[in-house]
Amino acid sequence: MASWFGHGSWFFHRVDLHRGLRDLATRPAAFEDIDIGPPVDMRLGCEVTGVNCEEGILKLADGRAIAKDLVIIADGAHSRLISDFTGRPSETHRTGRSIYRWLVSADEVMAEPALRGLYTRELPGFTGWHDPNKKVFWVTYTCRGGKMLNSAVLHDTQVDEDEGDAENLWHSPVSKSQVLTMVQNFHPSMKKIVTMASEDGIKVHHLYKRPPLTSFVRGRTAVVGDAAHVMLPTHAAGAGVAIESAASLEVLFRGVDGKDGPAMKQRMELFDRLRIPRCNLTMLASNAGPEWTKVPGFEEGVRKFYSGPLPPLGAMPYSKPFREVLFRHDEFQAAEQALAESMSSEL
Ligand SMILES: Cc1cc2nc3c(=O)[nH]c(=O)nc-3n(C[C@H](O)[C@H](O)[C@H](O)COP(=O)(O)OP(=O)(O)OC[C@H]3O[C@@H](n4cnc5c(N)ncnc54)[C@H](O)[C@@H]3O)c2cc1C
């Protein structure tokens, strides 16, 4: 992986990734001799209730209105602010698929002779099993330096078991017996990974989709992340493309005077031109499932936004040609190049 992409493949506990990103964002400007810009001033507990996207004005729950040169909407899959951006109700909707998620101690897993062999191989990546009859896909990987084992069980939402409760949009607890029923066709040794979970440790998370947006910018506002392109986790790419959008913003807005209207407009347009094809490709590919290239209508849909290469029709899902298209992208490079081209065309 490192020789191919210039970097290894890492698996994170979500909390650790959040902490690492926050540490980087709030570090002093010079870090290990690299200029990482001024530290971010994070203000927690400031709920935003609305955005005037054209003017860049945030409305806060405490009644304040704050004007900014640039506003980035990033309020996730259940975005309320996206309605202010598009001018219509959110089009995010449930898919009928959900995920059970939990963590167990890797030491406990390794103590089970039948399980140990699954996690001591040299190969990187995740270990998963599929029950085609019940349409269950169980993915596991170690994280936190190999100390924890993460499990995700993709399944049809069990409405009869209260999984369809609208109040519990994500992170609602679910019993071990419910998960064991779902994975009843798997080998008994694997079911031990369920019984190892703490009593209230398994959560269910509904999966959502939205139709693609045709623009991610409006006035002084851009939209990134799940608010812009929530997707099924088929390719584990949602946060990846959100982080790419952050890279794009970093390159495009470096040194720009926020009061310079024409410069801001030009950079917003560049952001849109870079991110719409890339994010909508990733979203549509993730929503079409592992064999996305074979799904009727997929290519026609994606070609409305993206003109680059697609994996050849006969290629195996998750194989190199798929990863080449989805993961080889370098947004720092793409944004630098787009910026340089736009500057030279102005001369
Ligand atoms: C089961 C599962 C597995 C996944 N695995 C992967 C993976 O392996 N790799 C990958 O790249 N992606 C993965 N994803 C996708 C990834 O989790 C999301 O794409 C990512 O979290 C989106 O980040 P975000 O910042 O846009 O939204 P979020 O992470 O949802 O963050 C939104 C933030 O906005 C805040 N907020 C919300 N409303 C307001 C408001 N009104 N005012 C102020 N703040 C507000 C929230 O508190 C939250 O902090 C997975 C998703 C799922 C469901």
Image: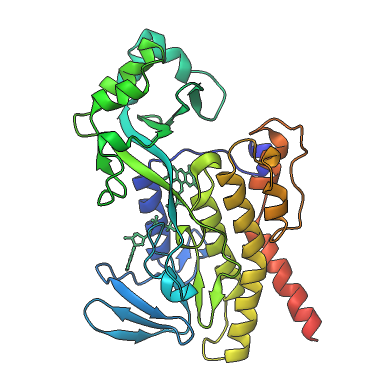
Q: Is residue 204 visible?
A: yes
Q: Identify which residue, 203 or 198, lies in the foreground.
A: 203
Where is the N terminus found, in terms of image quarters? Answer: top right
Residue drawn 55% across and 21% down?
122
Residue drawn 26% across and 20% down?
195
Q: Identify which residue, 147 or 306, lies in the foreground.
A: 306
Residue 308 to residue 30: above or below: above
Where is the C terminus found, in terms of image quarters? Answer: bottom right
Quadrant of the rendered image holding ligand 1:
bottom left
Q: Is residue 4 visible?
A: no
Q: Residue furthest left?
A: 199
Residue 128 to residue 338: above or below: above
- Color encoding of the figure: rainbow
Q: Identify which residue, 86 or 7, lies in the foreground.
A: 86
List x then y, in percent, for residue 127: 49, 25
Among the 4 quarters of the image, the one containing residue 80: bottom left
Q: Identify which residue, 224 or 173, lies in the foreground.
A: 173
Left or right, 250 with reference to 59: right
Among the 4 quarters of the image, the one containing residue 29: bottom left
Q: Residue furthest front?
A: 160
Residue 139 to residue 55: above or below: above
Left or right, 283 with reference to 142: right
Residue drawn 62% across and 71% down?
271
List x then y, in percent, for residue 58: 36, 80
